[in-house]
Amino acid sequence: MRFRASVASHEQRLVMSFRLPLGRENRLELASVHYRHVIEAMTKVDRELKPMWPQHLQKAIFDIKGLPPPLQLTSGNDLGGLERSLHAYCAAFKVQVPRWTIEWNTPSQPAFRLLPPSAQPYSTLQLLALFRALRYNSYFKELSFRNIDLSGIAGKKDYSHFGDTIAYTSLNGVKISEEHYDILMQSSVLSQEMHALAFSSESIRSMDLRNILGPRSTIGRSKDPEGARRVSSEVLRPILLLLKRQACLCHSITMSGNLIASSDIEELANLLVLDEVYMKKLDLSNCGLGDEGLTTLWAGIPGQGANLQHIDTSENQGTVKFETIRDSLSQLRAIRKLNIAGNTRLPFDVPLFEDHVLSSWSLEELDLSGISLNSPTVDILTAYLASQNSENLRVLRLSKCGLTGAQIAQMFYAMGQARQITLYINGNRLDEGIDDLCAVISECFGPWGLFMQMVEFALEANYIKLLKALTANRTIECLSLAGTATPDSASETACRALSDLFSQNHTIRFLDLSGFDAKLDEGRLGREFSKALSGLRFNTRLEHLRVRSQLLNVNIGDLAEAISANKTLHSLDCEGNDFNLSNFRHLVRHLSDSTTIRYFSAFSDRDLAQTIQKSVDNAVATATSARRQSMISKLRHEKVPQSISEPLAQQLRDGWEDAVRTQQEVLERNQLLFEEGEDGRYDSGQDGYMLCDGEEDFSKAFGGLALRAFESKKAMTRRASNPYLNNKRASMISLGPARLVSAEPGARVTRSWSRSYSIVSSEGGISAAESPSTGSAIPTPPEPESPVEKEYLVENQQGGNEEPLDYEYSFADPHDPDFGLELRAHRRFWSDEAGCIEEEEHGVQFEERHN
């Protein structure tokens, strides 16, 4: 918009120009005796709608001769006036307001996050409205556009002679050079907006740009790899240019999941060696980097050896020469999180780390998965685990590292007993040295969280030894044996050992015993496995159980009886077991006997739809076969009349829908019982809200329904001070048996419910080892990166089918409307006005004042 007038000549004329981004200009020439009031009103509205923009920038919009510099100050604005500005821009561009939230669990907080759209991808104007609203906003320290498709705005240029698309001055008056301005004028709109976001406010410390080609780009991006690299370049290059010119305070860049051009990697590597550059985090995992790109990057990393705290270059196709990466690692002095999974190959006798280098680090996370570790490296790692310098280590991933059971036993012993660390040793050679490993596990040495997935034992006896050791262990609280199995179906002895694990171990709270089923491989325990679930009836500790793809439909009664008798489970995920309607009804019937299970999933959404359709098709086919038994029908081909097939199909669909509805009501009842403290597990409702040690770490690592339950519990603690939000009681819910057991009398009391705590599906994230041809091949969820802690949610209300938040494993967060309503009722909860963020010093953030 442009506004031209004069208060000196008394012309009483006004010229207003309007132009949408990428559109044509429309001009209005007006006249009014009240032109002074019009000028005053327009300038005031501009300040109200863009409260954080520098006032001197009004001159670029309001060209008014004779008007003194604006001195009016706006009142305090929550979130830097973002809501006001965003709604104004969206109204001007005639688009819906995008969905967004604020995250408080990020290193640089608060963080603005744009949420995925509920239906169609965000339009160009929606994205531009958001980008413009975020300009000069000093409230946020991190911007996150992860899993948002920005490809639609890439490559577009806006030839505006006003030059208003370029942010040439920052909030504090710092201006870019003419050369820099000319570069931006020739750049795409996406590059200009990325520049504006990183430059204008001077508060942005971190940019999360993971997978900016959309949530499925990693699957379909190979169709146009060069196009994908161009999009990434338009986002990355303006940030690098600002860093090079010391015009940006951003020190953390996450570009995971985006193909990056070799020229951009070279520019980044050259930037890292500059003394004036300060970089704390660099995440370029899954960026399609080959040998040359990775080597170039790691050659430049030592330039930031004193600053880098987080490096992730995993999941790239290339590898780095051992000498290069070893030399670069030796120059890192501040590293806390290091992920170099699959990045190099080790020689036979030289360790990856020098002893004094690793011992000088204070690591929090280390991932060496996919690197075959030699004996010297294992020895140095073992010594590090025994030292005090490893006390901060919380996550250690050593999957597919060629480790033997004896080597892992050494690490367990070095950790000591009940070490508060989560260890991933998936796909290693546990058969070798199994006795040593079982001995240390029985003596309670090792981690409190253990992921031992996709291990195929050569001998069933070794598998049984492991189960007995885990049964005796009293320190492991989170355990995953997903995809771990014997060569053949489990014998009666193995099933008995599994049953003992359920009944005699009273320490494990999170347990995954899922199978694995793909076209060319299988890791299941066989048809007799369900008998082992009998031990679940006597378990007094297990809270979250996942048993996918284990043929539980063969003996459904074992699982159903276990559900009825168990009094501790909070979530149960048994997807991929090919339940039919009879199986499902039987499960739901026994589910109603439980008062503790609040999250239950027997089907993914896709599998449920396919199962219903399959049951309908089979029933119609059976009816067709029966109709053709007569001699006349044998002589001609005929279809079942619609008068028979349609009622039959509808009857089956009604049966499925009825079972799903009853399941949802049972789970909602149990959720309300839990909130009221009447589920039989706690003495009081408040006790039920308390979080146990390690629960957050375990829930995030385990993922799925366990993570949903954890987030729900956190939300309850936030709502505890607002009892009027929890005015529904479990006693209001009537569960009539008529829908499930037609032989039993009694009318069913129907009611309407506002939201369900039921999750029909946890929508498991597909493992890299899973075959896409089967829905049951989900051995375990992928390890999440940094699941979101939601504290504030503002979104455009567009009906009820909005896409939930990203939960890594499940691709969806539980939408909590009650909490959203609570926060919208108290928008000034943290502060009365938005001020500048307190600065960081030596990587440590000062406490922000919100009172």
Image (cartoon, rainbow, N blue to C red):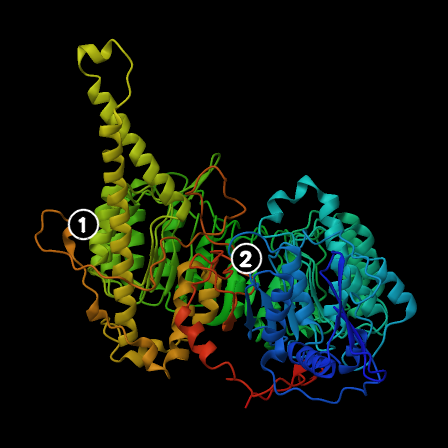
Give the amino acid type for the residue marked by disc 1 in the picture.
Leu
Crowd tier of the residue under label 2, counting other residues whose Cα lies within 10 Å: few below 14, some 14–19, many 20 or above: some
Judge whether residue 438 can be spotted in this image.
yes
Q: Earlier in the sequence, mark 1 or mark 2?
A: 2
Judge whether residue 531 can be spotted in this image.
no
Q: What kind of element bears circle 2?
A: loop
State the CA–CA distance, disc 1 to disc 2. 37 Å
Q: In which quadrant of the rendered view does residue 471 lie? A: bottom left
User: Which residue is nearer to you in this view: 115 or 535?
Assistant: 115
Residue 314 is labelled as none
75 to 547, vertically: above or below: below
**Residue 733 percent location from the top left of the image:** 21, 65
Horizontally, residue 768 falls left or right of residue 287, namely left
Mark 1 or 2, closer to the camera: 2
Which residue does the numbered mark 2 point to in the structure image? 117
Horizontally, residue 273 falls left or right of residue 194, namely right
Give the amino acid type for the residue marked by disc 2 in the picture.
Pro
Crowd tier of the residue under label 1, counting other residues whose Cα lies within 10 Å: few below 14, some 14–19, many 20 or above: some
Q: How many marks?
A: 2
Horizontally, residue 678 falls left or right of residue 270, namely left
Q: In which quadrant of the rendered view does residue 337 lie? A: bottom right
Q: In which quadrant of the rendered view does residue 648 lie? A: top left
Which residue does the numbered mark 1 point to in the structure image? 740
